[in-house]
Amino acid sequence: MISTFIFFHSFLFLYILSTPSSCSSFLSGIETGDLEKRGDLFPQILRDEAVARLVELGKVSDANDYLERTFLSPATTRAINLIRKWMEDAGLRTWVDQMGNVHGRVEGANANAEALLVGSHMDTVVDAGKFDGALGIVSAISALKVMHVNGKLQNLTRPVEVIAFCDEEGVRFQTTFLGSGALAGILPATTLEIPDKRNVTVKDVLKENSIEAAEEMFLQLKYDPKSVWGYVELHIEQGPVLEQVGFPLGVVKGIAGQTRLKVTVRGSQGHAGTVPMSMRQDPMVAAAEQIVLMESLCKHPEEYLSYDGRCSGSSIKSLSSSLVCTVGEISTWPSASNVIPGQVTYTVDIRAIDDLGREAVIYDLSNRIYQICDKRSVSCVIEHKHDAGAVICDPELSSQLKSAAYSALKRMEGDIQDEVPTLMSGAGHDAMAMSHLTKVGMLFVRCRGGISHSPQEDVLDDDVWAAGLATLSFLENL
Ligand code: GLV
Ligand code: MN
Ligand code: MN
């Protein structure tokens, strides 16, 4: 396996593929008073209202003290109603599909033309920030609202459909893209039987929401590729690059592939005070050893993955520049301080821009996990919960998005010397699932400190404005 993967991986994973020549703090804290007087920049809709909506949506949570919205939870139902209301306010025809995705569509001047789909996700991680997913939905609606209030929706050269996807984070069922995957036609019917931690299945949740789900539902949800022109997603960067180069917007060149595993380690449950150390079969220490091994493998894959000498090993080295591995969730049974656990379960999230490299890591890691279990006389089961290959964004769409970003920034700033940066995404996006249906393109928006999946997530109001204006420019030049 390794020898094959070496040949495919000759490029270096560079986060910044092209960056502006200067590091000016572009649009951060500029005097916006003069800009606001200009009628063509629509700050009331694209900045003030968009920011207020992000704040409002950020309060729609299933928890009292932090933001959490998972697949079709009560808070998600409230979010659906809110987003639908905003779509209607932008002059869009709306509906909610059988998976709980919210759609808002306008036909424009050519109802029979292939549609542009624009969107992002409305679900969140646990203790989330308010921009991840929401920014893409709100910016698209705001840009269309500007066209609506200016009587220009009918000038759109093709139908435009905004979609707020129901599940991108995969928090509840571990499998991600329940919404975009259904529309792209990549979900198997067995998806309905996936259980959450309380053994409630996707089908049960749909039923609780008055949706009788059956296999045929997936056929109905799948979009006909011939009816779709492309998919565009705007998203916060969730990393530090744009802030570092001092630019509010960037074009995404590609998205890293990802795999999620669930590892269950079973040992011999016993009394913490009586079982001698030499007689234990403790799944907790086995899991601990496996997790530390995983960190080491993912930091230095070149020290673990063997190769056959035909290549220099630079391919494996290049893998390490994008490879990231995380254990984000761990649970033990029965979870008491005076009990040697009987079972430990943990998740592994592995990502790399290089699919064969990621597969090689999973293969090697799995073998080593089993070896540790053997050595410690405990049993291991490794389940694959999610797999998504890396995606390269469509070059033509990317270049249109680059022009839109450039023209938006130029409209705000007057003149720009620098090129809009191009970067890779380590985070997963609905665009990955949508790439199975149509060409995809993405724009990133700078976020403070590169922080995401945290309540500290933040985006400057003026960057929200730039994002809306770039979306508007893109739509105007479709
Ligand atoms: C989604 O945010 C992911 O990359 O996990
Ligand atoms: Mn996220
Ligand atoms: Mn996201």
Image (tube, rainbow, N blue to C red):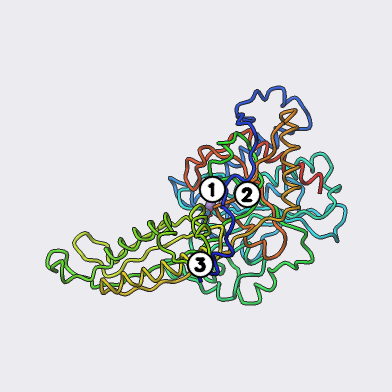
Give SS at disc 1: loop
Q: In the figure, 155 relative to 406: above or below?
A: below
Question: Mark on residue 136?
Answer: none
Q: Is mark 3 within 8 Å of ligand 1?
A: no
Q: Residue at x 38, y 73 (%)?
A: 381
Q: Is residue 270 shown left or right of residue 378?
A: left
Q: Picture coordinates of residue 435 (x, y %)?
A: 67, 62
The residue that label 3 is drawn on is 359
Q: Quadrant of residue 246?
A: top right
- In primary-sequence order, the first of circles 2 and 1 is 1
**Which residue corresponds to the image point at 73% horizontal and 46% vertical from the top-left?**
401
Which residue was labeled with disc 2? 82
Give the SS element for disc 2: helix
Residue at label 1?
60
Q: Gap between marks 2 and 3, in whole Å?
A: 41 Å
Q: Nearer the viewer, mark 1 or mark 3?
A: 3
Residue in the picture at 72% in, 22% down: 34
Q: Identify the amino acid type marked 2.
A: Leu
Whichever of labels 1 and 3 marks the residue nearer the N terminus, that label is 1
Q: CA distance from mark 1 to mark 3?
A: 38 Å
Query: Is disc 2 in contact with disc 1, using a CB cutoff of under 8 Å?
Result: yes
Q: CA distance from mark 2 to mark 1?
A: 9 Å
- Amino acid beneath label 3: Glu
Which one is nearer the viewer's eye here, 288 or 215? 288
